Amino acid sequence: MCFRPPSAGKAIKCPSCGALNPSIAKNCVKCKTDLSQAKEEMNKEENNKEDK
Ligand SMILES: [Zn+2]
């Protein structure tokens, strides 16, 4: 079985303060840190997993 959860419901963990932000958030809700970098890293990890 291949179950893939919708990426829209995935939370992004702030690399700075560790707060969980909605995937649509561009900046951390707590410390306003730019989340685009954290998103890219998450995508990389996902791609690596799928690649295996
Ligand atoms: Zn933060």
Image (cartoon, grey):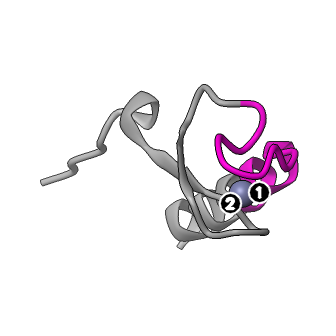
| Residue pointed to by mark 2 | 14
Amino acid type, mark 2: Cys
Tag 1, which secondary structure?
helix
Disc assigned to residue 38: 1
Report the residue that reaches farthest toward the front.
30
**Residue drawn at point x = 44 percent, y = 28 percent:** 8
**Residue drawn at point x = 57 percent, y = 60 percent:** 19
Amino acid type, mark 1: Ala
| Residue 25 vertical placement versus 1 (above, below) | above
Q: Earlier in the sequence, mark 1 or mark 2?
A: 2
10 Å neighbourhood of mark 1: few (<14), some, or many (≥20)?
Answer: some
Pair 1/2: label in front? 2
**Residue 3: x, y in percent?**
21, 48
Q: In front here: 38 or 51?
A: 38
The answer for how far apart the CA atoms under marks 1 and 2 are is 7 Å
| Residue 9 vertical placement versus 31 (above, below) | above
Find the magenta span and give its range. Answer: 26-41
Q: Is residue 33 magenta?
A: yes
Q: In front here: 9 or 34?
A: 34
